[in-house]
């Protein structure tokens, strides 16, 4: 586990295809603040129920349930389609022995050149 505050040493992804790996690295550190940095302020998270939540704080609460398992996540990007500053990602993921799915995610390159989640739909591939 990484110590809280260590996220400042991490860099945000500069390529859309690197977002899933950045998410896994931060998730596996157990640092919720580091995970939150990968989301735009107005991001949307779509849980398995389909009842979407909006805003970085709400997304952080949703991710807290997964982080609370204390188990590593593995990600395997299937497809990355980039159109200018927006990209569609299809990513297979598994939290060791507890949960798995195929995510359909939208990421956007910000004015700072870094990519962040706009829509995170971990069960969107079903």
Image (cartoon, helix red, strand yellow):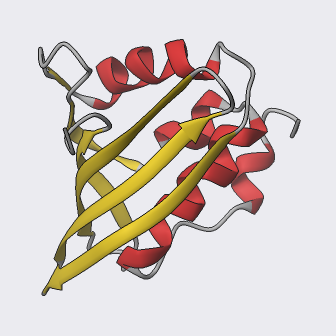
What residue appears at the point 12 percent right and 19 percent down from the top-left corner? Answer: 50
Q: Quadrant of the C terminus?
A: top left
Between 21 and 93, which is closer to the camera in this rendering? 93
The picture quadrant where one finds residue 41 is top left
Quadrant for the N terminus, please: top right
Determine the image quadrant of residue 35: top right
The residue furthest bottom is 84
Q: Nearer the viewer, residue 9 or 116?
A: 116
Is residue 44 found left or right of 66 in the rendered image? Answer: left
Residue 67 screen position, x and y as percent: 61, 22
For the point 51% across and 12% down, the residue is 65
Q: Decide which of 53, 69 is in the foreground and name it.
A: 69
Q: Position of residue 24 (x, y in %)?
A: 61, 50
Above or below for 77 versus 104: below
Q: How many numbered markers are drawn?
A: 0
Residue 60 placement: quadrant: top left
Find residue 120 and report its horizontal and vertical position in percent.
27, 42
Q: Is 1 positioned to the left or the right of 59 in the image?
A: right
Question: Residue 96 placed where, x, y %?
Answer: 69, 32
On the rendered structure, is 76 left or right of 3?
Answer: left
Q: Is residue 24 left or right of residue 19?
A: right
In the depicted view, which residue is nearer to us: 72 or 107? 72
- Residue at horizontal 32 percent and vertical 37 percent from the top: 122
Image height of 64 relative to 38, above or below:
above
Question: Residue at the spot x=24%, y=53% of the render?
Answer: 105
């Amino acid at each position: 586990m990484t110590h809280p505050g260590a996220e400042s040493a991490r860099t945000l992804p500069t390529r859309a295809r690197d977002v899933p790996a950045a998410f896994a690295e931060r998730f596996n550190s157990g640092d919720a603040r580091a995970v939150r940095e990968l989301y735009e302020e107005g991001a949307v998270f779509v849980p398995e129920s389909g009842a979407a939540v909006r805003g970085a704080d709400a997304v952080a609460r949703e991710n807290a349930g997964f982080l609370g398992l204390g188990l590593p996540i593995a990600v395997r990007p299937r497809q990355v389609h980039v159109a200018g500053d927006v990209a569609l990602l299809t990513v297979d993921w598994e939290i060791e022995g507890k949960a798995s799915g195929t995510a359909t995610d939208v990421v956007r390159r910000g004015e700072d050149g870094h990519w962040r989640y706009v829509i995170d739909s971990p069960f969107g591939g079903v």
